[in-house]
Image: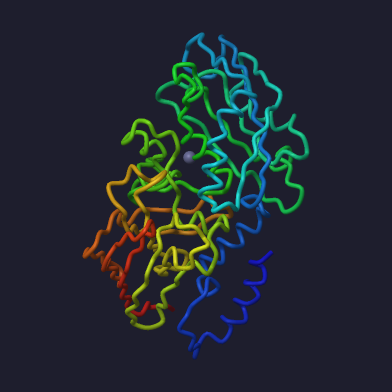
Amino acid sequence: MKHKKYVLLALLLLAPSCGRTSLSLGATDVEALLKIGIIADSYGEMTLGVDPWEVVVCRIPISTNDEIFEPSSERMSLSSDEIVKRLTPVVSYFKRHSYGRYQPVFSAGKDVIISDTETSDDCAERALDQSGPEVRGVMVVADAEHGADEFGGWGTPGVGCNESCSASDTRRAVYVGAGDFMDYWNGDSPLDLVEHEIGHALDWPHSTTSASNSGQELYDSALDVMSDSSAPRMVISTKRHGQGTLAINLYAARWLDDDHLKILDRSRRVTTKVQLLATDTDLSIMGKRFVVIVDGVNSFLTVELIAARGDNAHLKSNAVVIHRITVTGTSGVDRQQIVVKGDVQDGEKWAGNGISIEVLSIDSDDGEITAEIEMTVKKAVTS
Ligand SMILES: [Zn+2]
């Protein structure tokens, strides 16, 4: 709703494009950010408030022909009720990262079953078909483990929808193999895969450390639950959650607002100092959480400060990180998010493409982690 108003505003602001004197830019001045807002609008308010999910176990026959499954007669013993209980920390994870704006609520649904010749996709189709009108997302857990070389699961926001967005219509779903719910975890399941797949169902894309990895399905960044979500427990073996996600995803989900965003003007050469608060800082504290610097028609750089604590305790230290975001396609999952610099420390500098970003200091004071950044941009050449 809010963003529609901005589109109109943008048209008014953009029309007389010469002679604009405003020094402080808004999200409406950046076309790629406007697109992110329009895409978010097309999914209604799926990332805000209470989000009812139904958890369904899919029974996989021992004689299944679907090669995704490990050829084994072992099966997960948990019922959908027990999985719902196991997902309690996932509810807190999303409440925490959304600053209380989003809360998935899981309830147990009826098991589904597939035949020998059907595939894991049929599990999801069946669970979606049987879900009631109040259910906005279906989470299917197969009772068989995937083979070691197979993907762990998938998640989709489904098709855009504004009102009464039943999963049976939108086909919004998460599917995972039994791996994280098997008895050998002794009730202590890793939750990062489920959190990653729900991230897709919130319309978040993957991120990766290199542009050449994009399309290679190499999700190797320890900075983002939408990349290498197992990084926290690979460093600290007792960790069960995925790490946090990037500021741009928080913004697309409307968990961060325009007020939390600083946009650098590229209509002239400019040097600006910005104080950033760590992205995990409670929203009751005013301040910028990330900077956007346009560097192409559909792309921009983001600069944010990730605090090495909580779900991000696996990181070596608090770090300023830079990503290049390219907005393509008609949904958020199509966005390209690539690490430009994964860790800029005090006194370090990154420069490229007419932009230089220097971290003057990173400080921690009574739990409040901040970074002082100085950025210089050359005037962008635009046609
Ligand atoms: Zn994924």
Vertical placement of 161 versus 357: above or below?
above
Q: Quadrant of residue 87?
A: top right
The residue at the point 47 percent across, 27 percent down is 189
Please say which color scheme the image uses. rainbow
Residue 234 image offset from top left, x and y in percent:
33, 33
Vertical placement of 285 versus 8: above or below?
above
Residue 43 image offset from top left, x and y in percent:
65, 53
Residue 163 image offset from top left, x and y in percent:
76, 52
Q: Quadrant of the N terminus?
A: bottom right
192 or 228, which lies in front?
A: 192
Vertical placement of 365 versus 313: above or below?
below
Residue 331 image offset from top left, x and y in percent:
57, 52
Q: Quadrant of the C terminus?
A: bottom left
Q: Is residue 88 left or right of residue 2?
A: left
| Figure disc tally | 0
135 or 183, which lies in front?
A: 183
Query: Which residue in the rendered view is the most extreme toward the front?
Result: 366
The residue at the point 36 percent across, 58 percent down is 366
Query: Which residue in the rendered view is the most extreme toward the left?
Result: 347
Query: Which residue in the rendered view is the most extreme toward the bottom?
Result: 19
Vertical placement of 72 versus 22: above or below?
above
Q: Is residue 26 left or right of residue 313?
A: right
Q: Quadrant of residue 77?
A: top right
